[in-house]
Amino acid sequence: MQMISKAILLLVALFLLVPIVGCTGQKTLTVSEVVRDAEGLDGETIRVRGQAFLWTEPSQAEMWMFGGCVPGTDPSHSRQGIVVGWLTLYESIDSDDLGRYGVPHDEMGIRISDSDFHCNGDYCAVTCQPFEVVPRRMYELIGTLKVNADSEIILENIDLERSSQLVEGNWARIPGGEFGIAFP
């Protein structure tokens, strides 16, 4: 009887710990927790949850100031400007967090390294890889945290197989591939 009681206590303890550390044995950190403890987490493999924001250089507003996409009959002359893009996770993004041009302001985020996610293109469209980003969608990404000398916080060596995204209230796998984004 005493052995059964111990087994039940062990099962209850495990049941209570699963939500804390998840099925992978790794606690999910929020963006604010990672930002707060970045120095101590530097070099560690972590799981971080945050909302996605896709940055472009130049921004869409700047592209429009420079004339935007200029289609033409000759495809080699139809586009202008070089555009690069990168992904940053934020604690949350709501309308009040967005500045005048629709981008987050005054908030620290975690940039995903260019070697793990990047976009290239022009003023008409960019192609991103290795997965499609849905703006403002919640993601849980597993990777190694790196803090640069200028205190930029970067997540690199992303493990897409173990990472996930929140789709209609359920955590789902992140499908890989190349995805295009057209600018209006």
Image (cartoon, helix red, strand yellow):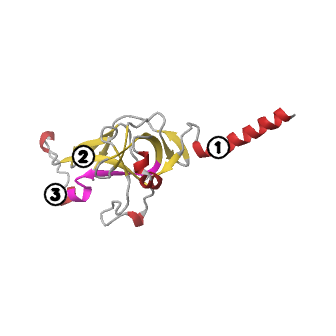
* Nearer to us in this view, 164 or 39: 39
- The amino acid beneath tag 2 is Val
Does residue 150 appear to the left or right of 14 in the view shown? left
Identify which residue is drawn at 32% across, 52% down.
Answer: 151
Q: Residues within 10 Å of mark 1 (few under 14, many from 20)?
A: few
Looking at the rendered structure, the secondary structure element under dot 1 is: helix
For marks 1 and 2 on the same chain, the one whose residue lies earlier in the sequence: 1
Q: Which mark is residue 84?
A: 2
State the CA–CA distance, disc 3 to disc 2: 16 Å
The picture quadrant where one finds residue 61 is bottom left
* Nearer to us in this view, 107 or 57: 107
- Judged by depth in the image, the label closer to the viewer, 3 or 2, is 2
- The amino acid beneath tag 1 is Leu
The picture quadrant where one finds residue 117 is top left
Q: Are marks 1 and 3 in contact (CB under 8 Å)?
A: no
The residue singled out by tag 3 in the image is 66
- Judged by depth in the image, the label closer to the viewer, 1 or 3, is 1
User: Which contiguous range is marked in magenta?
Assistant: 49-62
Does residue 43 appear to the left or right of 121 in the view shown? right
